[in-house]
Amino acid sequence: MPSTVAKAAPLPLPAVAGSVTTAVRAPTDALHPPFSPAVASLRVLRLVLLALAGVAVYCAVLGHLSVVLAPASPGSLLFAWYGSNGNGGPNSCQQVDPLIPTFNVNLSLDRLDTPEYRAAAIERFAGSLRIPTVSYRGVPPDDSEGDADHAGFPAIHAYFERQFPHVHAQLERTVVNKYSLLYVWRGTGGADADAAPLMLCAHMDVVPVLEATRDEWVHDPFSGDVDDGYVWGRGAADTKSTLLGILEAVEALLVAGFTPSKTVILAFGHDEEISGLVGAKAIYRKLSELGYDGKVGMLIDEGTDIEVQFGVEFAYVSIAEKGYIDIELEVETPGGHASMPERHTGIGFMSQAITALEAHPFAPKLTDDNPFLTALQCATTYGDPVQVDPVLAWALRHLPATRGALERYLDSERTTRPFVATSQAVDIVQGGAKVNALPERVTAAINHRVALHQRTADVERAVVARLRPVVAVAGLNLTATDVDGRVYAAIEAGPRAAGALRVRSVVTLETAPVSPTAGPAWEVLAGTIRHVLAAASADEVEGGTPPVVTPMLMPANTDTRHYWNLTPNIYRF
């Protein structure tokens, strides 16, 4: 997905599938930016080939201590992997050679790179966009037959059955919690076929469209139109492109007669946009019941993307996610007629609280284990020296002495700040019913994405600390409760209190474990990405140029939050 980057950013950042920057109001941004037929064909083809080659290479490689593979460059390379599970460290940007499967001539990537296949794949992709698989917060699945809010999910299930007949004839399909889908492609490698399976994930749901803004769209958000070089539709980037890419790849492998030696699991949730609590969470429970806890070899879900930075193509693979906490503030004050107000109404008190929070943003910190540091070092190492940001390169060369200056530099830009600091966004404020009536209850919802060096409890304590001066001056009682309802802070203003300020943690998620960038899983993924993207670029650059594969930090959250117990090897790309 193309990223929108501030002109003065010290480092342009990879786009994030599911990014909240794709707002629903602006006609262009609202579309989860569209793709031209050429770019759309290339994107869909790339996704198909990544999944296809990934399955083939994974089944051939993972689980072996050493294996001879044919790299994209001439000659051969002996990969000796001894199960290392460590991270490469802050200076790790070593590139593996591209990997290709050589044991089945029918799996040639060229057989899919035809105008006919591209056109058909694009049309299947566009067809999925025409099915409104919307997830609505606060609207759980209805057990009745007339569940209109979720009608798109049975429709897309049927669409998949029609478009991918081999998948549905040969894989075991389970409908989980009515609308999510779980496929199991059994391996044929003997006794250990079900050991260390590959798990490919995507989600079927998309965010709603505000009906009041629908006429602002150039094309209807569920049209799936291919027009004047663009494919239009909600979910084009987030993330029906990866969903269809996986299904296209498995269908193509089945048609070619391929049978995996290792089991392959496909997991498609239906409510990722509202935290996956009904879909992906239920998929995890099902896989846990089947005995897959700690046994999945590698899991790949949506994430960061492919971007040209400093004149070089980089493939950003997120190996960690920031944490998450929603905090609700509630101000309660006496009601009355607006002709007889106190000096501050509840809305005034809330304004003071919000101002205090926004006046004290969270401090940046760039630790050695933050994959964003590795991404920065890779960018300055492999980027065109003429285009590399000289300030950034200088600061990275002189670490750790320049760490503070580097943190402040990155914190100065909106596009880099989320990768080094906990973000804070006041997104909802509600209060007041009539212009001549004093508001008795005012609420505000604040979203935080928690940096790797912090925990949700740190955010809770920081919010209360910033509100203490406000309640002291305003004469408000304060009570703060965590997500389980336990009181962790209380301030009494006395019998003449002007009102009460309640601080409630509504949703919390700790930062994700950092996945390894050494060992078989990373080697297979990085090598496959380098081969496939070099092949996809061969039409533009003679021979094709492999991208630089680098670890990255995911600033948003994905369904992988529910799959931590399945494997340490979780990658978002």
Image: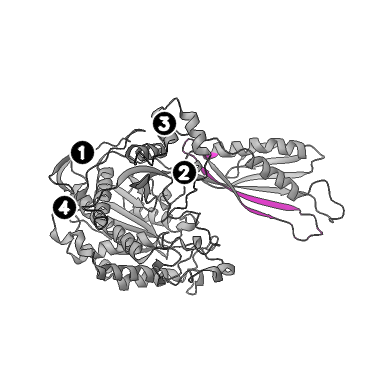
Q: Quadrant of the N terminus?
A: bottom left
Kindly identify which residue carries mark 2.
322
Q: In this picture, which residue range is highlighted in magenta? A: 427-456
Q: Earlier in the sequence, mark 3 or mark 1?
A: 1
State yes or no: residue 474 in magenta. Answer: no
Q: Which residue is mark 4?
A: 190
Magenta stretch: includes residue 431: yes
Q: Identify the residue under disc 3.
A: 394
For marks 1 and 2 on the same chain, the one whose residue lies earlier in the sequence:
1
Rendered residue at 23%/64% (across/down): 112
- Does any portion of residue 296 appear in the rendered image? no
Could you tell me how far apart the alpha carbons at marks 1 and 2 are, in whole angstroms? 30 Å
* Mark 4 in CB contact with mark 2 (< 8 angstroms): no
Q: Label 4: few (<14), some or many (≥20) within 10 Å?
A: few
The mark lying in front, picked from 3 and 1, is 3
Residue located at (42% from left, 51% from top): 15
